[in-house]
Image (cartoon, rainbow, N blue to C red):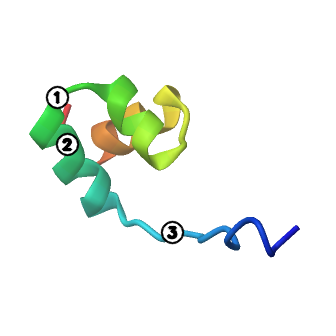
């Protein structure tokens, strides 16, 4: 199977990456989609950091 596909890459991101992305687009749903998180998780991160 690997002869047809590349191995998956596990990207690492920080809370600051989520905050910066939210500030640039302003949409929790888009940020959750980009980082493969639930909207609830993104919202709690943003609240904890004082962005919302």
Mark linked to residue 11: 3
Residue found 16% across the figure and 29% down from its top: 26
Q: What residue sits right under mark 1 in the picture?
A: 26
Distance (Cα) linking label 2 and label 3: 25 Å
Secondary structure, mark 3, is loop
Q: In which quarter of the image is the C terminus?
A: top left
Residue found 41% across the figure and 66% down from its top: 13
Of the image marks 1 and 3, the number of the one nearer the N terminus: 3
Distance (Cα) linking label 2 and label 1: 15 Å
* Name of the residue lying farthest toward the front: 4
Distance (Cα) linking label 1 and label 3: 22 Å
Q: Is residue 40 left or right of residue 7?
A: left
Report the mark closest to the observer, 1 or 3.
Answer: 3
Q: What residue sits right under mark 2 in the picture?
A: 50
* Name of the residue lying farthest toward the left: 24
Of the image marks 2 and 3, the number of the one nearer the N terminus: 3
Q: Nearer the viewer, residue 32 or 41?
A: 32
Residue found 67% across the figure and 68% down from its top: 8
């Amino acid at each position: 199977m690997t002869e047809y596909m590349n191995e998956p890459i596990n990207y690492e991101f920080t809370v600051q990456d989520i905050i910066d992305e939210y500030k640039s687009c302003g949409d929790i749903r888009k940020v959750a989609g980009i980082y493969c998180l639930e909207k609830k998780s993104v919202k709690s991160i943003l609240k904890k950091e004082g962005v919302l």
